[in-house]
Amino acid sequence: MNSASFRNLTKKTLFLFSLATAKRVSELQALSSQGEDLIISYLPEFLAKTERAFNHLPREFQLKSLTPLVGRDDQERLLCPVQALTYMLERSKNFSHKPRNLFISPSNTAKPLLRMPCHFFSKKSSSRLMSSFQRNFSNH
């Protein structure tokens, strides 16, 4: 992951986050992180599409690491959303004028990743994964 471009790292992290959290694109786009403990929260101004006055969504959630399950040296650790996020946050920590959003635009790191690119990255990654599964299963 160290050699990946920030764009590819963002795509991978976004994809792994969407798998791990089952959040809508609008929810993913409105996430921020609090420190290094990987407590993820929505930006205060965000209102989810399904949220109602009588049905509030939790504003914070914890994302668990897969490292205890797969080990630090296992190749499957590369599928851990916590590890991908850690790399992405480390890579972006020195960006000037970084937005509060967890996912930031690879083309303009002073801006958050907007909903349409977020949707595009997720859809493209999902399509590649499905193609890979189809190739692997048809070869057996």
Image (cartoon, rainbow, N blue to C red):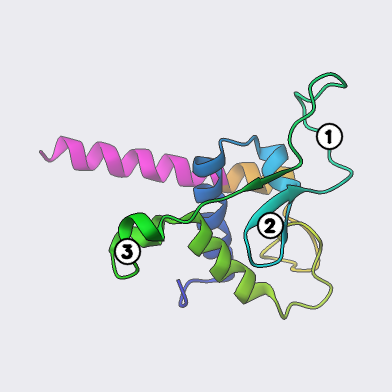
Residue 140 on image: x %, y %: 10, 38
> Where, quadrant-wise, is the N terminus in this rendering?
bottom left
Residue to which mark 1 is pinned? 47
Image quarter of residue 135:
top left
**Horizontally, is 6 left or right of 133 in the view?**
right
Residue to which mark 3 is pinned? 71
Q: Secondary structure at mark 2?
A: loop
User: Please, which residue is most extreme toward the bottom here?
Assistant: 94
Residue 95 on image: x %, y %: 74, 77
Image quarter of residue 99:
bottom right
CA separation in Å, label 3 and label 2: 27 Å
The amino acid sitting under disc 3 is: Gly
The amino acid sitting under disc 1 is: Leu
Residue to which mark 2 is pinned? 103
Q: Nearer the viewer, residue 93 or 128?
A: 93
Confirm whether the magenta stretch covers residue 59.
no
Residue 24 on image: x %, y %: 65, 34
CA separation in Å, label 1 and label 3: 37 Å
Confirm whether the magenta stretch covers residue 138.
yes
Q: Secondary structure at mark 1?
A: loop
CA separation in Å, label 2 and label 1: 17 Å
